[in-house]
Amino acid sequence: MSNSIVEHEAQIRLAVFFGIFILLAFLEILAPRRTLTFAKARRWFSNLGISVLNSVVLRLLLPAAGVGAAALADQQGLGVFNLVVWPLWISVPVFLLVFDVTIYWQHRIFHRIPWLWRLHRMHHTDPDYDLTTGNRFHPLEILLSGMIKVVLIVLMGPPVLAVILAEIILNASAMFNHSNLRLPLAMDRVLRQIIVTPDMHRVHHSIYPEEFNRNFGFNLSLWDRLFRSYCDQPRDGHEEMSIGIRGFQNDDATKMVRMLAQPLKP
C-alpha cells in the first residue's frame, strides 16, 4: 500500500489542488470579501507561475522531500515512530500536530531573521489578496522549507500517509485562508476557534508591521493563541485595510521576473 501511495502521490496532490482551487475560485466570485484593485490575469499568471516553478525546483533539487523522506526513514528504521510500533490512529494525528506547529515556528522565524525575511517578503508583496496569494512564495524559501520538512520527517519517521495528508492540508489551508472569501461573521467566529480563516490570516497581510507580525498559523489557530501572536481584527477593517509592503504596492509587484528579484532589494 505504501509503495502504491508513493507512486501516485503527485497525482493525488495535483487532483486535490485543482479541486480546491476551482471550488475556492468559484466561491470568491459568489461572495468576495474585498474589491481587488490590480489586474487579476497578471497576478494569477505570476502567482501560479511561481507555484509551477517551485514544484520544478523541488523535484530537481530536493527529490527526496516529503514522501521520499518518509519512505527512506521507514526503510532505514529512522525516527521516533520507527523505534516502536505506533498504530496509525496515533502516529498520523501526532505527526500532523507536530508538522503544523513546525510550520508555525518556521513562518515566525522567517519574519524575525532579516535574510529570511527578504525571501519571505515576496509572499507579502502581493498587492491584492486571494487564493493565489497562498501559492506565491520565493523558490529559495520553498527549498529551505523543503529541507526543514525533510529533517522533521527523518527525526519523526512518520507513515507515508501522514506526510501526504500533512502536505495536502497545508496546501489546502494556504489557499483557503488566503482566499478573498466572505464568510458569515458568526461562522468565522466559530471556525477560527479551530482553524485559520481568511479574515484571521488577512490581518497578517496588513501593511502595518504590528499586524503582519501576527497570525502566523496556516492551519490550526491554536498556535497563535498559545504563543501570543494572535490579532483578532485589522485596525482599518477588512474592506479598507491596505494589503502588502510599503515600497512594493505597484504593478512591478505583480510581474514574475520582478518578484523573483525582490530579495535583492533593501
Image (cartoon, rainbow, N blue to C red):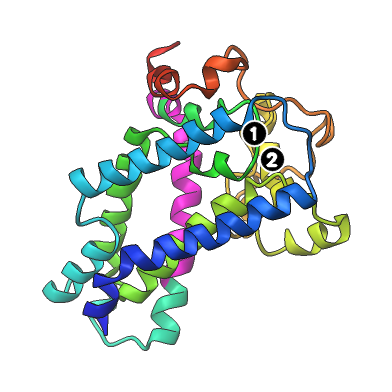
Three-letter code for the amino acid on which mark 1 is drawn:
His
Instruction: Judge left or right: residue 80 versus residue 75.
Output: right
Q: Is residue 96 magenta?
A: yes
Majority secondary structure of the magenta segment?
helix
Q: Residue tagged by mark 1?
A: 205
Q: Position of residue 183 (x, y in %)?
A: 80, 55
Label 1 Cα crowd, 10 Å radius (few <14 / some 14-19 / many 20+): many
> CA–CA distance between discs 1 and 2?
5 Å
Label 2 Cα crowd, 10 Å radius (few <14 / some 14-19 / many 20+): many
The part of the chain drawn in magenta is 95-118
- Residue toward you, 156 or 166: 166
Three-letter code for the amino acid on which mark 2 is drawn:
Arg
Q: Residue tagged by mark 2?
A: 202
Q: Which mark is residue 91?
A: none
Q: Report the residue at 21% width, 78% height from top.
A: 3
Q: Quadrant of residue 260?
A: top left
Residues at marks 1 and 2 touching, judged by CB atoms closer than 8 Å: yes
Does residue 89 appear in the picture of this structure? yes
User: Which quarter shows the C terminus?
Assistant: top left
Residue that extends furthest to the left in the rendered view of this protein: 76
Q: Position of residue 38 (x, y in %)?
A: 66, 24
- Residue toward you, 91 or 142: 142
Does residue 223 appear in the picture of this structure? no
Q: Report the residue at 61% width, 15% height from top.
A: 250
Q: Report the residue at 23% width, 49% height from top.
A: 59
